[in-house]
Image: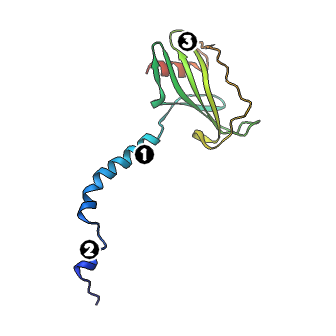
Amino acid sequence: MIQNSDQELSSFFPDDEFMKKQPVLAVMFMLVCLSAHAEWKKVSETIRADRYVETSSVRTEGDYRRAKELFNLYEKHPDWGNLSFVIEQEYDCPGRRTRTVTETWWSEHFGKGKEMTPADLSVSPRWDHIGPSDWNSPVLEWVCSQ
């Protein structure tokens, strides 16, 4: 039979001061985890990709909105090999127009893996009109309703 003194057993358990700090540490850990997690809301589907908006990225500037969109491709892009790309879009809500501000391509779904943005990719600052049956219409309507 093995006997342990109280002093030997106490080395296996945290001290009272450590235990008092546990709730604070747990809350801090949860906040860090939540802030690092993007919530992507699926807003449309096309024949080539599912399309999402990062809910926390929607910004209002008068009649305009800005938001990050994510495209998860069903198959790797035939020329570049990426499975997803993230764009920051600007929306003119009353004018039903949109334009791309930034674009980043990724090797894996949900903007993960290796960044694969072509070095020669240029983003056009021109506004594109969105008709009611346009593939951009569901995204514009969701973002402008926020």
Residue 140 in view of the camera: yes
Of the two numbered discs 1 and 3 on the same chain, state the one appearing first in sequence: 1
**Residue at image mark 3:** 96
Q: Which residue lies furthest to the bottom in this view?
A: 1
**Residue at image mark 2:** 10
**Residue at image mark 1:** 33
| Residue 99 position (above or below residue 49) | above
Quadrant of the snapshot with the C terminus: top left
SS category of the residue bearing label 1:
helix
Of the two numbered discs 2 and 1 on the same chain, state the one appearing first in sequence: 2
- The answer to whether residue 94 is left or right of residue 1 is right
Closest to the camera, between mark 1 and mark 3, is: 1
SS category of the residue bearing label 3:
loop
Q: At 25% from the left edge and 61% from the top edge, which residue is drawn?
A: 17
- Given residues 49 and 127, the one toward you in this image is 127
Q: Where's residue 37, x and y in %?
A: 46, 41
- Given residues 120 and 99, the one toward you in this image is 120
Q: At 59% from the left edge and 39% from the top edge, which residue is drawn?
A: 111
Distance CA(mark 1)–CA(mark 3): 36 Å
Question: Disc 2 marks which amino acid?
Answer: Ser
Q: Which residue lies furthest to the top in this view?
A: 95
Q: At 33% from the left edge and 52% from the top edge, which residue is drawn?
A: 25
